[in-house]
Image (cartoon, grey):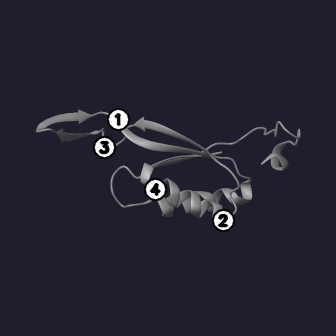
Amino acid sequence: MIIAAIKPYKLDEVREALTAIGVRGMMVTEIKGFGTQSGHTEIYRGAEYAVNFVPKMRLEIIVGDGLADQVIDTISKTARTGKIGDGKIFVLDVEKALRVRTGETDDDAL
C-alpha cells in the first residue's frame, strides 16, 4: 500500500501519470494537515490570520511488489514542485486483499 499526501492541484497530473504506468485504481481523500511548514499566515480583508492546517489530497494505492517502486517514483516526480509542502509518501505491507464481487484474493484482487 502506498499512501501519498500531495498538493490538491497536482492530483489530476499524478492520476494521469499513474494510469500511464498501469495503475488501475486508487482511493482519494481530501485531508488537512501540517508538517515542516507548520501551517502559514494569510491576509483576508486586511487582517492577518493563521492557517494551522494546509489542504492536501491523500492517495491510497495498492499494487503488487513489482510495480511499487515505479509508482513511488512516478508520484515523487509528478507531485514535486521543489517548494515546501510537496507532501510525503509512505509504503506499508498489505497482508491480504479480497475483491468482494468475485471473491478473488491477493494479487488477483488488485
Badge 4 element: helix
Looking at the rendered structure, the kind of residue marked 4 is Lys
Q: Earlier in the sequence, mark 3 or mark 1?
A: 3
- List the single residue furthest toward the bottom: 20
Q: Which mark is residue 73?
A: none
Residue 12 coordinates in the image, percent (x, y): 52, 57
Circle number at residue 21: 2
Q: Quadrant of the N terminus?
A: top right
Viewer-proximal residue, 9 or 58?
9
Element carrying mark 1: loop
Q: Secondary structure at mark 2?
A: loop
Decide: few, some or many residues near mark 4? Use Cα within 10 Å; few <14, some 14-19, many ≥20: some
Residue drawn at point x = 85 percent, y = 42 percent = 105
Q: Residues within 10 Å of mark 2 (few under 14, many from 20)?
A: few
Going by the numbered disc 2, the residue's amino acid type is Ile
Which of discs 2 and 4 lies nearer the camera? The answer is 4
How packed mark 1 is, by other alpha carbons closer than 10 Å (few <14, some 14-19, many 20 or more), is: some
Q: Secondary structure at mark 3?
A: loop
- Residue type at tag 1: Phe
Q: Earlier in the sequence, mark 1 or mark 4?
A: 4
Residue underneath mark 4: 10
| Location of mark 3 (residue) | 37
Say which residue label 1 marks.
53
* Left or right, 33 with reference to 91: left
Q: Residues within 10 Å of mark 3 (few under 14, many from 20)?
A: few
Residue in the picture at 30% in, 43% down = 37
